[in-house]
Amino acid sequence: MMDVEKLYEMLKKAQEAQGYFFNKDRERTFELLEALLVNKERYGYMVCPCRLASGDREKDKDIICPCVYRKPDVEEYGSCYCNLYVSRQWNEEKIPQVYVPERRPPEKFEF
Amino acid sequence: MMSKPPVKIYSLSTCSHCKSAKKYLGDCSIKYEFVDVDLLEGDERKAILEDVKKFNPRCSFPTIIIGEKIIVGYKENEIKEALGL
């Protein structure tokens, strides 16, 4: 399994360039990155740690991290559903850190 | 002493919000049952998901049942209130 430190460094540059920052709570960020590596081992792709994967890549493509809901969630709440990717303001506590509700449409849950 | 309501969490083993909820309950020394749904397979998983959908049609996690109350997501205030803390 790839080392979580390496994954962090690899993603950090690319994502920050797009305006997405890792949660400054380092423990939370590393816990989630580790979970992504576990899911990569388990399913073969980095499906979101906070959503139940179906195991079918086609069905799960909207929740492969970074998920398609990250953009609207960060715009509206300053954070993605997992609190892995956040805005600068979130990290600088310039906006309230509120609970981010599930944006994924229920019909996507096919089990 | 008012008896504490039963607490059950439907969680994912990889979800940080679920871990926070379990940690919070542990810190408050509240006994709870939990099911890591992502670790289940086949019929058992289907059955548990039917249960979750009864409480939370969105089937998101954590889904926390405290007595009669259903709390979706790690919302500390709602959990505290439901526990009567």
Image (cartoon, coloured by chain):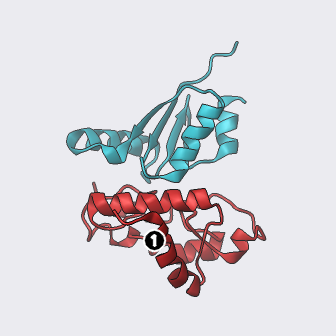
Chain colours: A red, B cyan
**Exactly how many numbered labels are in the figure?**
1
Out of A53 and A42, give the one closest to the viewer: A42
In the rendered view, would you say B71 is above or below A21? above
- Tell me, yes or no, if residue A82 can be seen here: no
In the rendered view, would you say B25 is above or below A63? above
Q: In which quarter of the image is the N terminus of chain A?
A: bottom left
Determine the residue located farthest toward the left in the rendered image: B42
Determine the residue located farthest toward the top in the rendered image: B1
Task: Look at mark 1 in the image and give the residue it sits on.
Answer: A6
In the rendered view, would you say A36 is above or below B22? below
Q: In this view, does A75 lie to the left or right of A6?
A: right
Q: Which residue is drawn at 44% across and 59% down?
A: A34
Residue A110 percent location from the top left of the image: 29, 58
Disc 1 sits on a residue from what chain? A
In the rendered view, would you say B4 is above or below B72? above
Determine the residue located farthest toward the bottom in the rendered image: A17
Residue A55 percent location from the top left of the image: 26, 60
Q: In which quarter of the image is the C terminus of chain A?
A: bottom left
- Amino acid type of disc 1? Lys
Q: Which residue is drawn at 57% across and 87% down?
A: A17
